[in-house]
Amino acid sequence: MDAMRRSRSCACTTIEKKSIEDDRDELSSDPRRDIANRMRLSRYESAIRRWVDALNERGARVLVEAAVHPEVRVERYGFGDNLGHLMQVIQGTSGVTEWFGLTPKSVQFEIAGPVVFESLESSRSSGQEGPQGSDDGSIARVRYQVSTVGFANGGTWRYELADDDRIAWLAHRPDDLPGGSHQERRPSTGSNSE
């Protein structure tokens, strides 16, 4: 009986050690890299929260300036017949402030998923205007939800940060509307172009 207890004890100890070792293998072998990745994620999460705050406050200038780089480039994509087509380019703090100001007061935006990174190298073409992204070259992606009385939809924001941790580039890609819809190109706002 003592022999059985010892073999069970040894088996349990071995299993526990293996489980702990497996857990350690799942963690990075470089704790500095883990800390750097958590810090990078925190920077991108904070930036998109500032974006949503400025948007929900309809472009309060001080909130927009906290959220976006002065030379920000926002690409607004369409829905319905224009799903996936670039509809408008909004540039600079004044353009974003004006665009946010067009949002009706009853409309609310919120983050609807985790921030994830698409790549370590920028997929934007080098010919695009706007500030260069931060040194880490990351493009983040996050789902958003937009709602008002009797309506809810969502979409995806893809974005890069400038070295000052404000948004340098953002692609606003709404999901298609249920039942389809036709969308007209909007006039330029601020220093916007198409």
Image (cartoon, grey):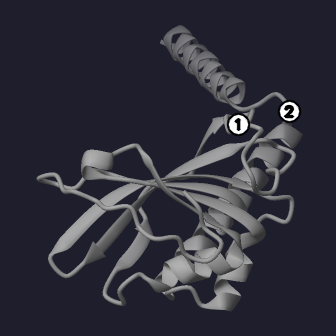
Tell us which disc is closer to us: 2 or 1: 1
At which x and y percent is residue 136? 82, 43
Up the image or down, 126 lies above or below 80; here it is: above
Up the image or down, 9 lies above or below 74; here it is: above
Q: Could you tell me which quadrant the C terminus lies in?
A: bottom right
Snapshot quadrant of residue 43: bottom right
User: In the image, 130: left or right of 184?
Assistant: right
Label count reads 2
Residue nearer the viewer, 176 or 32: 176
Snapshot quadrant of residue 53: bottom right
Amino acid on which disc 1 is placed: Ser
Up the image or down, 73 lies above or below 180; here it is: below
Q: In this view, which residue lies farthest toward the left?
A: 179
Residue at image location 54% in from the left, 14% down from the top: 2
Snapshot quadrant of residue 33: top right
The crowd level at tag 2 (other Cα within 10 Å; few <14, some 14-19, many 20+) is few
Residue occupied by mark 1:
125
The crowd level at tag 1 (other Cα within 10 Å; few <14, some 14-19, many 20+) is few
**Mark found first going from the N terminus, 2 or 1:** 2
Circle 2 sits in a helix, a strand or a loop, which is it? loop
Task: Give the CA distance from mark 2 to mark 1.
Answer: 32 Å
At which x and y percent is residue 79? 31, 52
At which x and y percent is residue 6? 58, 15
User: In the image, 97: left or right of 154?
Assistant: right
Residue occupied by mark 2:
30
